[in-house]
Image: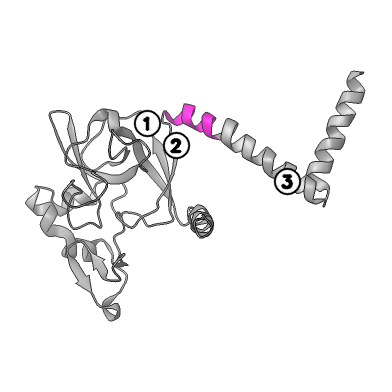
Amino acid sequence: MKTNQVTTNIKKSWNWVWHSDSPLSWIVALLLIFILVKFIFFPTLSLIFGTTLPLAGVESSSMDHQIVKDSSGRYTLCTETFSQSEITHQDFDDYWDVCEDWYEHNNITKNEFENFPLNNGFRKGDILIVWGRFTPEIGDVVIFQPNPEAYSQKPIVHRIVKIEDNIIQTKGDHNAEQLTPSNNNLNTDETHITQEQIIGKAVFKIPYLGWVKIWFAEFISKFI
């Protein structure tokens, strides 16, 4: 087959995939997009950003600085519970007024927190840009494998609050306390995280974009 004929056939196939209204062309287009994203786009991002998880979708409210309804139907922020009529937008000063006790007790001042990366937290449904080549510091928001013995667990995105003897401790900005095996059912202990558990550091957030994945996952879960 001549080169010109091959080129012509490729062009015809390309036009059919992207310009045809047939159901089969839609299926082929979706498959091509999946292949490009899965095997080219994400591996390239991983190489550039130095982490296996260059983009992370936020699937919980553990870093939210707003009053959020929890799984028990209560409206909470850190240690406090609110009525629905008390829900207002919380700026950083409002957040600190509610949550400062834990941080002050652990030697983190308001001024220090204000200078932390992503110091206003982020919300469920946001997308995080993750960087893998870094030296962990207090205040960094890191993505880590919660239980090194159970790699099927989803990574957790929390803030570093202490580093001592190469052991890292984290806490969710929204949470009342750190996760330990005694207060969660996943055997997660964020008071003892090793460097090997760290996947990367969140350096930027894209609001709301992650809701597409969350809605899709919740829809699929209804049928399985």
Question: In this rendering, is residue 69 above or below 161?
Answer: below
Horizontally, is 48 left or right of 38 in the view?
Answer: left
Kindly identify the residue that appears in the image at 89 percent across and 30 percent down: 8
Q: Residues within 10 Å of mark 3 (few under 14, many from 20)?
A: few
Kindly identify the residue that appears in the image at 17 percent across and 37 percent down: 192
Marks 1 and 3, how far apart at CA: 35 Å
Which of the two labelled residues, at mark 1 and mark 2, occupies the earlier sequence position? 2
Which of the two labelled residues, at mark 2 and mark 3, occupies the earlier sequence position? 3
Q: Position of residue 223 (x, y in %)?
A: 54, 58
Is label 1 or label 3 in front?
Answer: 3
Inspect the image, locate mark 3, and give the three-letter code of the amino acid beneath it.
Ile
Instruction: State the mark number for residue 207.
Output: none
Q: Position of residue 40 (x, y in %)?
A: 59, 31
Is 49 one of the magenta-colored residues? yes
Where disc 1 sits, the SS reads loop
Question: In this rendering, is residue 139 above or below 174?
Answer: above
Kindly identify the residue that appears in the image at 85 percent across and 34 percent down: 11
In the picture, residue 76 is in which quadrant?
Answer: bottom left
Magenta residues: mostly which secondary structure? Answer: helix
Horizontally, is 34 left or right of 170 in the view?
Answer: right
Q: Residues within 10 Å of mark 2 (few under 14, many from 20)?
A: many
Which of the two labelled residues, at mark 1 and mark 3, occupies the earlier sequence position? 3
The residue under label 3 is: 27
Check if mark 1's residue and mark 2's residue have beta carbons within 8 Å: yes
Q: Which residues are magenta?
A: 42-50
The residue under label 2 is: 54
Residue lying furthest bottom? 85
Inspect the image, locate mark 1, and give the three-letter code of the amino acid beneath it.
Gly
The residue under label 1 is: 132
Residue lying furthest top? 2
Is 213 one of the magenta-colored residues? no
Kindly identify the residue that appears in the image at 35 percent across and 28 percent down: 133
